């Protein structure tokens, strides 16, 4: 697993697949960070991706490096409002 996390740290940008009205939807997206509790991504409530994730939390994220090596993650998104994670996002975006 550590190899996957290292890959994501070095290749933060990829594609996030969601669905909208039972149709697949893919967009560029950035890997956020990892903790002992899981892998984190972030967005805001005013984004289309947010409402899509609220409707259907099933996602696929794929990050690729310059050699076309890739990591693909699938799973269910869980939302959090915990301040400790917001602090990490704020720190990363400075």
Image (spheres, helix red, strand yellow):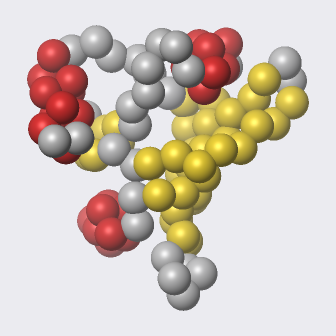
Residue 21: percent from the left, percent from the top?
84, 18
Residue shown at the point (51%, 82%) measured from the top left = 66
The reply to whether residue 51 is visible in this rendering is yes
In the picture as drawn, the residue positioned furthest to the front comes out as 94
Taking 19 as reference, is 27 left or right?
Answer: left
Nearer to the camera, 24 or 44: 44
Taking 43 as reference, is 92 left or right?
Answer: left
Q: What number of labels is visible?
A: 0
Residue 88: percent from the left, percent from the top?
16, 35
Taking 29 as reference, is 24 left or right?
Answer: right
* Picture quadrant of residue 25: top right
* Picture layout, residue 76 above or below residue 8: above
Residue shown at the point (59%, 49%) measured from the top left = 28
* Picture quadrant of residue 90: top left
In the picture as drawn, the residue positioned furthest to the bottom comes out as 67
Residue shown at the point (56%, 21%) measured from the top left = 47
Residue 15: percent from the left, percent from the top?
60, 52
* Picture layout, residue 6 above or below residue 16: below
Residue shown at the point (23%, 34%) measured from the top left = 89
* Picture layout, residue 32 above or below residue 76: below
Location of the C terminus (image quadrant): top left
The reply to whether residue 35 is visible in this rendering is no
Location of the N terminus (image quadrant): bottom left
Residue 82: percent from the left, percent from the top?
21, 15
């Amino acid at each position: 697993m550590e190899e996957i996390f290292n890959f994501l740290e070095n290749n933060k940008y990829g594609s996030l697949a969601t669905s909208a009205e039972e149709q697949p939807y893919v967009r560029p997206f950035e890997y956020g960070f990892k903790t002992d509790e899981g892998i984190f991504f972030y967005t805001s409530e005013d984004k289309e991706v947010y409402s899509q994730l609220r409707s259907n939390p099933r996602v696929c994220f794929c990050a690729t490096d310059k050699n076309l090596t890739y990591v693909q993650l699938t799973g269910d998104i869980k939302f959090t409002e915990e301040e400790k994670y917001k602090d990490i996002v704020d720190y990363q975006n400075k």
